[in-house]
Amino acid sequence: MSVPMLLYVLLFNYGPMWGWINAFKDYGNRKLVARGITPFNGLDNFKWLFSRPDFFEAIRNTLAMSVINLVFGTVSAIVLAVLLNEVRQRAFKRTVQTVTYLPHFLSMVIVVAMAQNIFATNGPINDILVGLGLTQTPVFWLGEGKYFWWLVGVINVWKEVGWGTIIYISAMTAIDPSLYEAASIDGAGRFQRILHVTLPGIKSTFVILLIMNIGHLMEAGFEIQYLLGNGLVANYSRTIDIFVLEYGIQQMDMGVATAAGMFKSVVAIILLVGANFVAKRLGEDTLV
C-alpha cells in the first residue's frame, strides 16, 4: 500500500533534483541559449549569488519571517490547545475549534485581501487605534518595512493557529487521566496541573514538530510576501523564493535561480539534521 506514495515522492520530490545541474550552467549568453546550448560554468553562479547584497537581504528576510512564524505559531497553538483542553462544555469547545481552524482552508489570496482592508490607513485597526487615542494619525501598516515582518507573522498565526491546535489537542487526549487525578489529590491547582502534567505530556509532540519546523526555516513562504509586498517594502518582503522568481522567470537566468534554490535546500537539510542531532543528544524524541 505504500508503493503509490513512494512512487509519488520519487517522481515529484527526488525526480526534479536532476534539474540542479542547471545551477552549474551559464544562461547569460542569450545567443547560445537560443540555439539550445548552455555551457557549464562551474561555481560561477554561486560566486555571483554571494556577491549580491540583495541575495543576503533575501536570506535575512526569509530567516526573520520564518523565526517569527515559528515562535508565534508554536506558542499560540500550544496556548490555545491548553485553554481548550480545560474547557468542559463540549459545544463551546467544538465551536471555538471550528472557528479557529476554518481559516486554514482559505486561499492566501483571500486572506491577503482581507488583511489589506483591515490594515489599510482607513481600515478598522487604525479606526480603533485613533478612537482609543493610542495614535494621533493612522499608521501606514502596509507601506513601512518595519511593520512587514510582524504583519506576516500575525496573518500566519490567524490562518494556521487552529490547525496547529488540533495536533496538540490530540496529543493531550493521550495523557493518562489518572495523572490529573493524582495531581489533584496532591493538592495541585488547575495551573499546576497544566504546568506539571499537560505540558510534559505533549513534550514529545512539541519536539518532533519543532524539528520539522526548523527544517522549514528557509521557507518563509511566497504567496503572502508576493501578494502583500509592494515597492515601498520590497527590501523587507523579498524572500529567497521571490528572488528565484525574479531571476528565473522575469530575467530568464535559470542558472542563478537554480543555484539560489539549491542553496536553500542544502541549508534546510543541514538545519533539519542538526536539530535532530541536538534533540537526540538531549535525550528527546527525534525523527530518526
Image (spheres, rainbow, N blue to C red):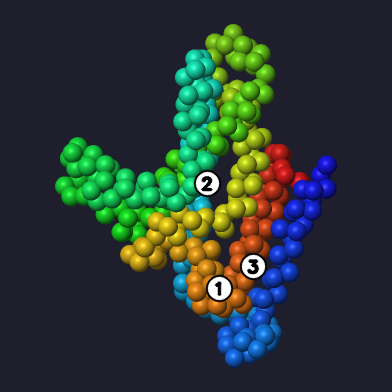
Is the residue 132 above or below the residue 170 in the image?
Answer: below
Numbered disc 2: secondary structure: helix
Nearer to us: label 3 or label 1: 1
- Quarter of the image for the N terminus: give it: top right
In the image, farthest residue toward the front: 35
Q: CA distance from mark 3 to mark 1?
A: 13 Å
Residue 160 on image: x %, y %: 51, 41
Q: Earlier in the sequence, mark 1 or mark 2?
A: 2
Residue at (61, 77) in percent of width and height? 255
Residue 70 is labelled as 2
Residue at (59, 70) in percent of width and height? 260
Q: Amino acid at mark 3?
A: Met
Is the residue 284 above or below the residue 68 in the image?
Answer: above
Numbered disc 3: secondary structure: helix
Side of 137 where 249 appears, left or right: right
Number of dots carrying numbers: 3
In this rendering, does residue 200 appear at all? no
165 or 288: which is nearer to us?
A: 165
Nearer to us: label 1 or label 2: 1
Residue at (50, 51) in percent of width and height? 67
Residue 252 on image: x %, y %: 55, 77
Q: Which residue is mark 1?
A: 248
Q: Amino acid at mark 2?
A: Leu
Label 3 Cα neighbours within 10 Å, binned few <14 / some 14-19 / many ≥20: some
Residue 127 on image: x %, y %: 22, 42
Q: Amino acid at mark 1?
A: Gly
Residue 262 is labelled as 3
Q: CA distance from mark 3 to mark 2?
A: 23 Å
Q: CA distance from mark 1 to mark 2?
A: 28 Å
